[in-house]
Amino acid sequence: MKTVNLAAKLAQFSTHWDPHVVADYNDNDVMVVKFQGEFPFHLHEDTDDFFLVLEGEMVMDLEDAQHHVSAGELFIVPRGVTHRPRAAAECKVLLIEPKGVPNTGDPATAAPKPRI
């Protein structure tokens, strides 16, 4: 057991759309990531997608709606729903996903998830 300082973890990298695992929770990866620009539209067939904005603001685009998510707010995309996160300026986000879930929904195009 140990305390995880999210700001310190986020300071270890400067890339965008590059999730880094900072802790394990049951069979889930707890990750931090920086968003800027647009991520491709994608979906996850078997799991919901959890986003907690730590700093900044993001927009979650769905097929028929847009949701603004600010620091201190979370947004959950239900499984099977096509979505795209985007951020005009850098946004820092905490993600929780089952271990092994590709961030794009497709293992062929998914980013690696290094542990920091």
Image (cartoon, rainbow, N blue to C red):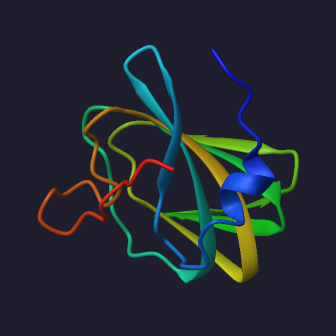
In the displayed structure image, the side of residue 71 where residue 104 appears, left or right: left
Quadrant of the image for the N terminus? Answer: top right
Q: Is residue 23 visible?
A: yes
In the displayed structure image, the side of residue 38 where residue 52 appears, left or right: right
Q: Is residue 67 visible?
A: no
Q: Is residue 4 above or below residue 41?
A: above
Q: Residue at x 36, y 54 (%)?
A: 113
- The answer to which quarter of the image holds residue 87 is bottom right
- Towards the viewer: 84 or 23: 23
- The answer to which quarter of the image holds residue 112 is bottom left
In the displayed structure image, the side of residue 103 where residue 59 appears, left or right: right
The outermost residue toward the front is 2
Image location (x, y in percent) of residue 114: 38, 54
- Towards the viewer: 113 or 76: 113
In the displayed structure image, the side of residue 21 where residue 81 appears, left or right: left
Image location (x, y in percent) of residue 37: 59, 86
Q: Is residue 50 above or below residue 58?
A: above
Q: Residue at x 63, y 66 (%)?
A: 12
